[in-house]
Image (cartoon, grey):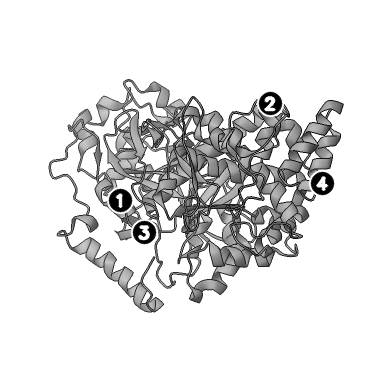
């Protein structure tokens, strides 16, 4: 977290950092060292700023974007027509037309910003008509403070419909071909944007030799020659594979990050796509050189952002990883998200975002298999450095406020978020309230605290646990869920969930008991015997009276925990949460662990049957017991009721 100092001094410090970044080359961490002997004939991929980016991501604070002077826009109609004349020696006629608009959006407040972020366009918080020296995590625009909502810049298709009520300015009208390297490079040349001198012409021997490879768009009727290019090079058609590192019992391999948004940019040319089931992305647009590759943790299922201690507008946008500015990128280049050695770092949030991103898709697949309701689409997830990596919370506030802005109790829950989860200081608490009213998290996950929680199966269990709450919300609705959030907020006492046997405990026991079951059950289904050791059934705040669950005897640590859970172990302050009950309803009748003092004569109740007993009028564990028993056969009714009794219900 930033040192406590007056805002004006902090801003001056950032500006000074930017000046130092540009002016000096003695500090490796803050200097981009370009390859001295880089040429067009160098077959190896080159990243111009990866070392700097990686060093910044090992910090706990964000770093600013650094810009240079204005650039000439090569894609202006006048420049593209001049390029056409130079290449094809004739007037372009109708071959050059407006295909794209360079736009500036000026949201006036957080509500407008939230609406703008939902648009399916690539937004940048810095002007694209300035030279990009280094792309960081934020940019303080001229005339604005760190906390002002900035202008956003984008390149959109000509037919783009501007969101109503948001001020937008068309900066330039442009012709941007997808695949006409000959024409595009001539436009880059005459505007001084080739970078690396006349490399393109040197490699190909002049424009006359290229006419057969790149047909005249005026004659072919299309600027898309991708399928006509012989020996397509990934150096100009960026391709890669996004992977995340496992941290399991004996497995530290890399696996694909799927359905992940990828954005590639060079000057005003932007392409966006999603990784496939193998984590692979491929651009079908030509990019000359020095293109920047980002990934953004957002798709139709969810958006994963990161709470900020300042520049609060940045937490409206998904977690972004800048993989650097590249030349000669090799086909299928592997971009790795490594397992972090420490908690609380920017790189830690990247790993947690990747595990969460994949975990959402894993959860949805298992929900389909178990016939359990999905969470709502477009769940808003926020990661917080302030809370430990074993902590999560699902208040579904963004969904509730979108459907019922005047819902009673929401402001109290937002206050809890700011107090317990947001890293903002007291001076920004009022601004944070305004920001969270415009865009609140549905689900929250920590990435600080004890790094021992940062194993793949344990973090996935946390992801599945909170998403099971979101599935529960989808069938019980706003009122039930606000009452649940208020219950957890108001239920005072020891442990994470407060005192048992209060007017709030019945609802908490149902919601948390179900989520403990489904989280560990799915973690076992996904990771099985690669599951790692973890502590539970004691005081996780003080690390006292804990039991440790390990994978052994062909049983995963997650099943070991569920199967051996002892509701009579009152030294655990959360003993009254029936963490083993739902698995005892599901599992074979034969008990593997007799030490939990449970006589379990129930077996084979499916997840769908258990979840089907959840409803708006089922307010707690006692009402749930009655609803479930009513759905059981005659012989099951007695054994199910007895099992609930043994858990104290």
C-alpha separation, residue under disc 4 versus residue under disc 2: 24 Å
SS at badge 4: helix
Side (left or right) of 359 relative to 210: right
Q: Nearer the viewer, mark 2 or mark 3?
A: 2
Q: Looking at the image, which is closer to me, 636 or 285?
A: 636
C-alpha separation, residue under disc 1 versus residue under disc 3: 13 Å
Specify the label residue 143 is tagged with: none
Disc 1: which residue: 53
Up the image or down, 597 lies above or below 441; here it is above
Disc 2: which residue: 589
C-alpha separation, residue under disc 1 versus residue under disc 4: 54 Å
Disc 4: which residue: 623
Residue 258 in picture, x, y percent from top left: 48, 33
The residue sitting at 12% across, 41% down in the picture is 37
The residue sitting at 79% across, 43% down in the picture is 624
C-alpha separation, residue under disc 3 versus residue under disc 4: 46 Å
Q: Quadrant of the N terminus?
A: bottom left
> Is the residue marked by circle 2 packed among few (<14), some (14-19), or many (20+) residues within 10 Å?
some
Mark closest to the chain's N terminus, 2 or 1? 1
Disc 3: which residue: 60
SS at badge 2: loop
Residue 384 in picture, x, y percent from top left: 49, 56
């Amino acid at each position: 977290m930033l040192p406590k100092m007056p805002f004006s001094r902090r801003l001056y410090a950032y500006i000074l950092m930017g000046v130092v970044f540009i002016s000096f080359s003695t500090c490796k961490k803050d200097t981009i060292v370009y390859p001295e002997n880089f040429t067009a004939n160098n077959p190896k991929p080159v990243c111009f700023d990866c070392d700097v980016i990686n060093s910044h991501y090992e910090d706990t604070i964000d770093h600013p974007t650094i810009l240079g002077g204005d650039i000439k826009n090569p894609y202006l109609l006048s420049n593209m027509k001049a390029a056409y004349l130079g290449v094809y020696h004739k007037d372009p006629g109708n071959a050059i037309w407006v295909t794209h608009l360079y736009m500036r959006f000026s949201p006036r407040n957080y509500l407008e910003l939230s609406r703008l972020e939902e648009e399916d366009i690539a937004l940048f918080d810095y002007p694209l008509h300035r030279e990009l020296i280094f792309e960081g995590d934020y940019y303080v625009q001229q005339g604005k403070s760190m906390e002002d909502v900035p202008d956003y810049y984008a390149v959109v298709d000509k037919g783009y419909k501007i969101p109503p009520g948001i001020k937008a300015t068309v900066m330039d009208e442009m012709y941007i071909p997808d695949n006409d390297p000959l024409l595009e490079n001539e436009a880059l040349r005459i505007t001084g944007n080739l970078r690396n001198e006349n490399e393109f012409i040197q490699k190909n021997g002049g424009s006359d030799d290229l006419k057969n490879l790149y047909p005249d768009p005026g004659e072919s009727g299309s600027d898309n020659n991708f399928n006509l290019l012989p020996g397509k090079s990934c150096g100009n058609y960026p391709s890669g594979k996004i992977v995340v590192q496992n941290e399991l019992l004996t497995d530290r391999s890399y696996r694909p990050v799927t359905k992940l948004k990828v954005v590639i940019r060079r000057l005003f040319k932007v392409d966006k796509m999603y990784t496939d089931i193998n984590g692979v992305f491929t651009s079908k647009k030509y990019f000359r050189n020095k293109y920047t590759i980002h990934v953004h943790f957002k798709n139709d299922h969810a958006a994963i952002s990161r709470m900020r201690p300042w520049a609060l507008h940045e937490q409206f946008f998904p977690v972004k990883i800048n993989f650097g500015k590249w030349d000669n990128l090799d086909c299928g280049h592997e971009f790795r998200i490594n397992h972090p050695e420490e908690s609380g770092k920017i790189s830690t949030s990247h790993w947690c975002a990747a595990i969460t991103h994949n975990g959402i898709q894993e959860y949805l697949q298992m929900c389909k298999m178990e016939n359990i309701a999905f969470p709502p689409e477009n769940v808003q997830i926020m990661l917080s450095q302030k809370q430990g990596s074993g902590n999560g919370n699902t208040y579904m506030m963004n969904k509730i406020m979108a459907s019922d802005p005047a819902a009673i109790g929401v402001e109290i829950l937002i206050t809890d978020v700011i107090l317990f989860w947001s890293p903002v200081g007291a001076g920004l608490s009022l601004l944070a309230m305004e920001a969270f009213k415009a865009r609140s998290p549905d689900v929250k996950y920590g990435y600080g605290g004890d790094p021992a929680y940062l194993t793949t199966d344990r973090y996935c269990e946390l992801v599945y646990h909170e998403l099971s709450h979101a599935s529960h919300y989808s069938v019980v609705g706003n009122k039930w869920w606000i009452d649940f959030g208020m219950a957890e907020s108001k239920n005072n006492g020891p442990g994470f969930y407060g005192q048992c046997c209060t007017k709030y405990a019945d609802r908490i026991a149902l919601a948390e008991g179900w989520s403990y079951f489904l989280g560990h059950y799915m973690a076992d289904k996904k990771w099985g015997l690669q599951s790692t050791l973890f502590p539970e059934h004691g005081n996780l705040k003080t690390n006292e009276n804990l039991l440790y669950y390990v994978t052994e005897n062909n049983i995963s640590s997650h099943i070991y925990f569920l199967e051996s859970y002892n509701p009579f172990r009152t030294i655990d302050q959360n003993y009254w949460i029936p963490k083993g009950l739902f698995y005892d309803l599901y599992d074979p009748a034969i008990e593997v662990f007799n030490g939990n003092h449970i006589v379990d004569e129930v077996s084979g109740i499916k997840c769908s049957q258990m979840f089907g007993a959840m409803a708006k009028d089922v307010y707690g564990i006692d009402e749930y017991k009655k609803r479930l028993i009513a759905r059981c056969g005659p012989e099951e009714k007695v054994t199910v009721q007895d099992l609930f009794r043994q858990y104290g219900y």
